[in-house]
Amino acid sequence: MSTEESRKQNFAWRKASRSAGNGACVEVASAPGHVAIRDSKNPDRAMLASSSSVWRSFMADVKNGDYDLPL
C-alpha cells in the first residue's frame, strides 16, 4: 500500500495508552494486511505504511527491549 493510498482511506487512528499527551507520539491504524503510521502532531503530513508482518516483528522487538538505550 502506498502512502497516497493510505491517505485516501478513512482510518481509525489510535495512540499508545501510555502517551504523555504532549503531542510527541505516533498514531497507528490498521488496514487489511498493512499498518499505517503517522506523527500525531502533524496528521496531515506524510505517513508510513508497513506490512502487518513487519509491524508485528517490530512490536515484538520493542516489547523485548531490543531498542532500549543502555543504562
Image: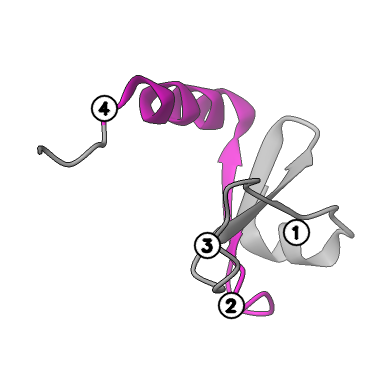
Q: Nearer the viewer, mark 1 or mark 2?
A: 2
Amino acid on which disc 1 is placed: Glu
Q: Which structural element holds mark 4?
A: loop
| Discs 1/4, front | 4
Please name which of the two marks, 1 or 3, marks the residue nearer to the observer: 3
Q: Let me know if residue 68 is in the magenta part.
A: no
Provide the residue designation for mark 1: 5
Q: Earlier in the sequence, mark 3 or mark 4?
A: 3
Q: CA distance from mark 2 to mark 4?
A: 26 Å
User: Which amino acid, mark 2?
Assistant: Lys
Identify the residue at horizontal 63%, vertical 61% (top origin): 3
Q: Earlier in the sequence, mark 3 or mark 2?
A: 3
Q: Which residue is mark 2?
A: 41
- Residue 70 vs 53, above or below: the answer is below
Q: Which of the pair 5/66 is nearer the observer?
A: 66
Q: In the rendering, at what x and y percent does residue 2 appear?
A: 64, 55
The mark that comes first in sequence, 1 or 3, is: 1
| Left or right of residue 23, residue 1 in this image | right
Is 56 placed left or right of 33 in the picture?
Answer: left
Mark 1 to mark 2: distance in Å?
21 Å
Circle 4 sits on which residue? 66
Local SS, label 1: helix
Residue 18 horizontal/vertical position (percent): 57, 48
Residue at (48, 29) in percent of width and height: 59
Judge the density around disc 3: few (<14), some (14-19), many (≥20) Cα neighbours within 10 Å: some
Instruction: Tell me, yes or no, whether the two marked residues, 1 and 2, touch with CB atoms within 8 Å.
Output: no
Residue at x 79% of width, y 40% of height: 31
Looking at the image, tell me whether mark 1 or mark 2 is earlier in sequence order.
Answer: 1
Task: Give the residue furthest to the right.
Answer: 10
**Dot label at residue 25:** 3
Q: Any magenta on residue 53?
A: yes
